[in-house]
Image (cartoon, coloured by chain):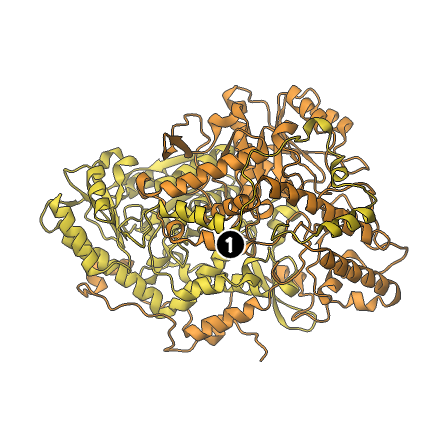
Chain colours: A orange, B yellow
Amino acid sequence: MAYDKLIFELSKEGKKAYRLPPLDVDDIDVEELIPEEYLNKEELDLPEVSEVDVIRHYTNLSNKNYGVDTGFYPLGSCTMKYNPKINEDMSRLEGFVNLHPLQGEDCIQGSLQLMYELEKALCEIAGMDRMTLQPAAGAHGELTGLMIIKAYHEKRGDSKRNKIIVPDSAHGTNPATAAMAGYKPIEVKSTDKGIVDVESLKEVIGDGEDIAGLMLTNPNTLGLFEKDIVEIARLIHDAGGLLYYDGANANAILGRARPGDMGFDVVHFNIHKTFSTPHGGGGPGAGPVGVKEHLVEFLPTPMVEKDGDRYYLDYDYPNTIGKVKDFYGHFSILVRAYSYILTMGRDGLKKVAETAVLNANYLLSQLKDDYYLPIDTLYKHEFVLGGLKGDNLEATTLDVAKRLLDYGFHPPTVYFPLIIREALMIEPTETESKQTLDEFAKAMKEIAEEARTNVKLLKEAPHNTIVRRPDEVKAARNPVLKYEG
Amino acid sequence: MYPYISITPEDEQEMLKAIGLASVDELFEDIPEEVRLNRDLDLEESKSELEVRAYLRELANKNCSLDQMTCFLGSGAYDHYIPSVVNHIISRSEFYTSYTPYQPEISQGTLQYIFEYQTLICNLTGMEVSNASLYDGGTAIAEAALMAAAVARKKDVIISKSVRPEARRILKTYAHIQDLNIIEVDIAEGVTDLEKLKSLVNDDTAAVIIQSPNFFGLIEDLEEAAKIAHKGRRTSFIASVDPISLGILKRPGELGADIVVGEGQGMGIPLSFGGPYLGFMAANKDYMRKLPGRIVGQTEDMEGKRSFVLTLTAREQHIRREKATSNICSNQGLNTLAATVYLVTLGKEGLREVALQSTKKAHYAMKKLTESGKYKPLFNKPFFKEFALTSDIEPEVINKKLRDENIIGGYDLGQDYPQYKNAILYAVTEKRTKAEIDRLSSILEGI
């Protein structure tokens, strides 16, 4: 049966999907409890469906989705690794899930201990001194980090520093965050080898008096390790600025290198990338932020501390930037991350990075005959191709991506980073087998062959999906943002 | 071998050969010697599933979960009933293991439920457009203030002291980086002092923010506050609401709100020690191209079939970089699904019934708890599901005693409002029974 309804189109008067116990207190008319002027006199504009309708509707919708559990998802920079099932179970333990955030401290010792131990583990992995678990996501971590950098300069009375340097290969969140934090983002160019151009950086820094800091992803969005990092850190620090580490690509260096040792002052991790928690169709993730000793005083409150064998929430940070989020962060996501760290341990986490890098470089070796490789070098966890190889090909990166859907794969990230034309950014992650990588490479090669011999197949792709190239221009020109009946 | 790593030692050798390297170490030769970690991380060794499970269970058991306790605590996070269907749907891994729906052809499931979510939020709040959600109720207020300030090109944001204190703290943190001035309006008898509000609104006012029901559970006069706010030039009136209360209370869209935000945790999302929750944001059409975060729109595919895509992306960081309306990248994906399933499961009658039962039980509890005169209502105003009581006994003493009786007592208001020392804010949802309320009452009487 083809399924193409909205839940509103299933509604029928009189249907119900719920049942509450009968009211067991005095049934006083609500008009006697709350003045009429505040009460809604109309019926609610919500559907009426049965429980079977609900389950069937959303089960059918789930079948229109593609997840990591469905198949290979090499979406560059998103680290779509497998989401272990034990993590889900642990996050749903009664003691974690049915716990109110404002219960007394003696009632929440287990949660506080978990946060305390997770913070310690993340600090060790990052090479930082303390970490706040409060930020909700990577972008939120970036914002928190820049707030901390701002507070640091302000406390020193250093008010001229109004610029944040961002490489031209950076994620869009970096310049957006800098602007949101009240800074002017300035771009530093990459070399033709894809890494920060140190000479260009020196020019951008100038006399350095207005530089608040630099945001850097390492390995960067091309999947390349910024090998001049020590020099970059020295230049920024000499200018009086601070270094921010965007942890989007931290999966590549677990147990092999640490941002703290590279000279970064502030770090965020994307828990939903590196530490295997599910992406959830766009969230919720978590973006803890770590700092070195000289920035600890600015961290958001509360922090979890330990006194003897008692854990407590510490609000005593007079120079804190304040709160960035309700309560203590995305706790149930943090439970999943800790479950993962315990499972993998020091040996497993290192193996994660090694295998992620091995998989990426292996896959690259299988693709570079058919796809253009702008920078031929050793990559870390991901690599960026510049579209199909060959002259006068009509097929674009978008066509390749859409054709991959017919082969049953999630396409790579496309047209990012911006500095590579026709970019195809591929991140296989460590959880994929050689068989899967080989199957993907085979599909990519077949598509390259199709581009040469039967380009129509690509131009009209996808052929097998439930919808085909929905019209995004129309959606933006005539926005229909809700069901009108 | 590790269960989540699928490369065998034999694969590894073959793959290294294909790359042209002799060892895994060579894969990391681009990392300068001086920043390599030449030791093991100071963490424990890897563990089996049984060991991890046992340890985390031990931690979970150190908490007092609401399965063993009766909860009368609210203050921004509520113990509402979650229908079984919610967890079953959000546990479908096609939903939870997918990412932001960049490829619409294989993401129609996510895109359609977000479209349904946007519709439900608009219908519930009486607004024209909704985004695909924000991190939580607190950051939603901050994002709304930043949006209003950007639209008006003004810096003054007025917020009532009856707005949840933690949300105000978050707003202050955000305001600092954009040089916004936060002006707090006093409260009179538990609600926003509208006379004072009147005296504060002027042509520099970017936004007025009121919460209703407010932190004390009291219903604010949003309609009057909106009128006052609109005396300012291009001033946005922002209402923060409890979506459950909209089962019976007037929709803020009909009361003059320009932007409606709120915490959606009550809609099918577990307490989970504070997160992840769900921030929602809906607004008038004028704000459509200024909203932060993801938005889904309806369109047609090559064959004219109804389909859904991420839209109005020219607002967003991945397209606009430093000119984006916000840096937000993710939404609360899976939690919007939970809220969607919750709202359609309860439906037209159910949400109203949840709201009615909550308010009737809360009113019963207020009456019961104040009967003897030992505990007095702090305010005498219409309320929804929370109310504050004051007495001569310190909240700490009361809550300690309740805890010994497996009851989680209310919120000590003196923590945030020194003038309300010895006042406790109780929350009563539809889940509480008459027997539980009576028991609370008798224990309180015995203190």
Circle 1 packing at 10 Å, graded few (<14), some (14-19), many (20+), is some
| Left or right: A465 in relation to B201 | right
- The relative height of residue B6 versus residue B179 in the rendered view (above or below) is below
The subunit carrying tag 1 is A
- Residue position marked by numbered label 1 in the rendering: A86
Q: Nearer the viewer, residue B313 or B365?
A: B365
Q: Nearer the viewer, residue B335 or A212?
A: B335
Query: Which percent across, then down, holds residue B410?
Result: 25, 46
Q: Locate residue A386, reporting x and y percent.
A: 80, 50
Location of residue A478 with respect to A188 vertically, above or below: below
Does residue B332 appear in the picture of this structure? no
User: For the image shown, how many numbered marks are present on the structure?
Assistant: 1
Quadrant in the rendering for residue B431: bottom left
Q: Amino acid at mark 1?
A: Ile
- At horizontal 89% and vertical 55% (from top left) the residue drawn is A390
Q: Is residue A326 left or right of residue B369?
A: right
Name the spot of residue B177 as percent of width and height, x first: 51, 33
Q: Which of the two residues, A274 or A392, is positioned nearer the viewer here?
A: A274
Q: Quadrant of the N terminus of chain A?
A: bottom right
The reply to whether residue A212 is in sight is: yes
Q: Would residue A353 be found to the left or right of residue A61 on screen?
A: right
- SS for callout 1: helix
Q: What residue lies at 14% left-to-right and 54% top-to-bottom?
A: B368
Quick one: which residue is furthest to the left in this view?
Answer: B372
